Image (spheres, rainbow, N blue to C red):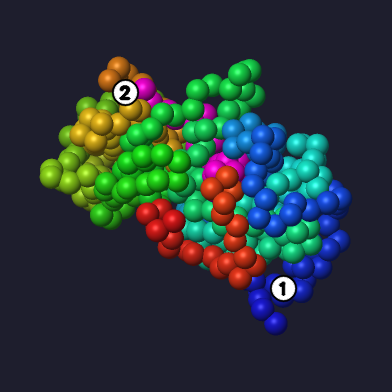
Amino acid sequence: MRMVNGVEMDQVMNQKKSSSFPSASKSPVSGTRPVSGTRILGIETSCDETAAAVIEDGRLILSNCVASQVELHARFGGVFPEVASRQHIRTILPIIEEALQQAHMSLGEIGAVAVTRGPGLPGSLVVGMNTAKGIVLGSGLPLLGINHLEAHIYSAWLAVNPPQPLPPEPRFPLLVLIVSGGHTELILMKGHLDYERLGATLDDAAGEAFDKVARLIGLGYPGGPAIQEASASGDPRAFKFPRAWLEGSWDFSFSGLKTAVLREVRDLQRVYDTLPAADLAASFQAAVVEVLVGKAFKAASAFGAAEILVAGGVSANMALRGALHAQADFPVHIPPIALCTDNAAMVASAGYYRFTAGQQDGLDMDILPNWPLIEV
């Protein structure tokens, strides 16, 4: 009997059979290609957000439901993988039902099911993957395995409560900066689904550095919002933290910056009873933002990008957004705050473009916890 985080698969499948999903009155013929009005059901469980969404034609959000586990993991100071996967099992079916209900859709009106295949936590990914397979097995809908980083990119194609007509799409070639808890990468996107990785972090990702520094200066979890809030009353020039430019490459490194903050904190603790948390946070944030923005603009110029696209959880940072919009050399696309962190709308959007390209995966598809974008 196969187990998912201590739960027998028969139990999971029985939950699916008893689910109150609107029934599929008809199933698309295998191999059909999407047309205007194609709706994709997206499922996201790569880390600690259980999410489902319905997207039309890759852009229009019909529903986007997220069950956050932030409060659950706050006591651990970070995501506890076993807790995350068990919570996904409890939450995923109600979230999918809610997404379909909010979109006023039955499965018979859905064109395909897109699910995050990787990268992510194995125990979390397998919950979403097996749930998607159960839906597909029962409905006959096409199945699409989606790369989580590609999904973050396609969040920029989505519109929240859009005007009519939809706003213009990002123009190719795009210089893409992916900044999240686990990834910091510079990508040249030459067209839909066409990627060339220019550089990536050699150690800590930007979001990971935010979390670690937040713990160092006593700001708690999650680190990104905590540092942004503290920085609002701090002086970004109070501490001269290093900038790792790594000249001659498009790579990043934030471990040295994190170590510099640690040394400063230890020196301050020898003298003061209370750390100047606001100044430390603001100075650290300024160092990260300067390198991210500086490298992105240099790469955009070097590779002849028409526009810059920034995506991932760290793209919600207001200092980063402000620095990107402060220049006039390149149009910049940053998703709305609600679409920066993990969600299923972005998975469904990427799924639409994969479906348009003819992708359809089998039930033998497995998760890929370390799936690089360039191997998609």
* Residue 125 is a magenta residue: no
Instruction: Find disc 2 in the rendering and name its residue.
Output: 330
Identify whether 22 is placed above or below 294.
below
At label 1, which amino acid type do we have?
Answer: Met
Q: Residue at x 31, y 23 (%)?
A: 330
Residue at the farthest bottom position: 1
Q: Residues within 10 Å of mark 1 (few under 14, many from 20)?
A: some
Could you say which quadrant of the image residue 269 lies in?
Answer: top left
Which image quarter is the C terminus in? Answer: bottom left
Badge 2 density bin: few <14, some 14–19, many ≥20, Cα 10 Å: some
Along the viewing direction, whichever of 130 and 25 lies nearer the viewer: 25
Q: Position of residue 71 (x, y in %)?
A: 59, 47
Which residues, given as a range, are shown in magenta? 331-354
Q: Is residue 187 something one can see in this rendering?
A: yes
Q: Nearer the viewer, mark 2 or mark 1?
A: 2
- Tell me, yes or no, if residue 87 can be seen here: no
In the image, residue 266 lies at what x, y percent? Answer: 24, 49
Residue picked out by circle 1: 9
For image coordinates 47% across by 58% down, the residue present is: 119
